[in-house]
Image (cartoon, helix red, strand yellow):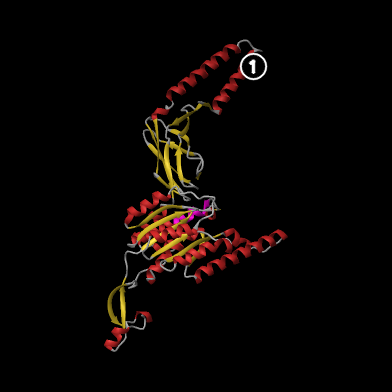
Amino acid sequence: MIPTRRLLVLLLLGAVVVAGASFAQPLTWVAVLYFIALLGLMVADYAVTTKPDQISVARSNEAKLSLGVPNLVSIQLDNATPRVVRFQLRDEYPYQFRADAELLHGRLPPLDGVELRYHVTPVARGDYRWSDINLRYRSTLGTFIRQARYPAAADVRVYPNVLDVRKYDLLARKGLLTELGLRNAKVFGAGTEFERLRDYTPDDEFKRINWKATARRSKPIAVEYETERSQHVLCVLDAGRLMRPQLGDIQKLDYAINAALLTSYVASLRGDQIGMLTFADEVGVYLAPGKGRGQFYTMLELLYNLQSQPVESDYGRALGYLSVKNKRRSLIVVFSDVVTLDAAQPLIAYMGRLARHHLPLLVTMNDPNITRLVAQPPSTTTDVYQRAVAEQMLAERRVILDTLDRAGVLTLDVPADKLSIAVINKYLELKTRGVL
């Protein structure tokens, strides 16, 4: 129990009476009676004040928290007494999280309950642990503050951003996917499986003309293909040192994982088979392409605790392994990064080989700090030097991406906060064009 200001004032008044008793003897009995009355007030206050076991406190939150976004946490308090309880609550969430409220205040009605809400934002994936809940409330007569600790320890896992998946489902049901930034991507007769022959129209591509049928019928005949519903989409995640830097509070690897999961989820909904590979200096986890939501949740479990490594990535080992394991032509989305042309030579070489049998897409995240330095007018000698280095890095990055383009490798270089939407739009575009 913690004394309130009211009790301290009352004790101070008693001290004044005691001090006066040294000058006037009758005040001694007044002081004794005063402190007896004050003690009685405290005892009565203790007796009528709500006891901690008459208040129930319970926390509820998702078993799987999402990385980098606010996750809702609810705390339910119930009062079993006919007295109002004004309280202050502090939940002991994992110290690695950011919260939008340190202390929660409220009023607990008599024989009723109240729900408190706040949000936590994890900045790293992995296993964490909640601790207990602390509650402070003022006594009925205001002489002390009661403090109680309610056991609420629980384990919790931080996963990649699964909230984006739920948001996608919700907007898809309402037909509002454009609110996410997704472009309309309906598939009209694109694919590689033969469906039928029909008359050629000016809107058809020249390559769709069937010359044998044209010769037999003496008029242009086009081939119409059936859209393939079960193509392979594999996400390859580089977990080496280039993916360790943070953009804001979150590592590049975490942005890549979020984008890979959401893209895979969208692909699975469109009937494609999804798979993945992780690597650094060695091959990590390989998940062969498969269908359905079960495949997506398997991928989620495999990725929730993937950590970046302070080592150089071995592109040859990873992409060579993938070529052996996956023979069928596939869209292979590689999440990595490039810095210098010399360091990127192995990536360029092996991605070029991959393009002979598959459709490779290299996804990189541009650094907003470098972009800002290039756009910012220099005012000091240091600024001039920093801008020159930033311009050189951007120029070298463009050379690398152009080299990959010439080798038949698709590239996508976007800011981290737009990564997921950009990759999904690219996938939908490729699906529409039927280039797989």
Amino acid type assigned to the residue bearing label 1 in the image = Ala
In the rendered image, the vertical position of residue 72 relative to residue 206, given as above or below: above
Residue 287 location, x and y as percent? 38, 54
Q: Nearer the viewer, residue 130 or 331?
A: 331
Q: Nearer the viewer, residue 68 or 113?
A: 68
Res. 153 in view: yes
Residue 131 location, x and y as percent? 46, 35
The quadrant in which residue 429 appears is bottom left
Where disc 1 sits, the SS reads helix
Residue 234 location, x and y as percent? 40, 60
Q: Nearer the viewer, residue 218 or 366?
A: 218
**Within-10-Å neighbours for mark 1: few <14, some 14–19, many 20+:** some
- The residue sitting at 43% across, 24% down in the picture is 48
Q: Quadrant of the C terminus?
A: bottom left
In the rendered image, the vertical position of residue 9 relative to residue 97, given as above or below: above
- The residue sitting at 32% across, 58% down in the picture is 291
Residue 52 location, x and y as percent? 42, 28
In the image, is residue 7 part of the stretch drawn in magenta?
A: no
- The residue sitting at 64% across, 16% down in the picture is 19
Q: Which residue is mark 1?
A: 19
- The residue sitting at 40% across, 28% down in the picture is 53
Res. 182 in view: no
In the rendered image, the vertical position of residue 204 relative to residue 365, given as above or below: below
Q: Which residues are magenta?
A: 250-258
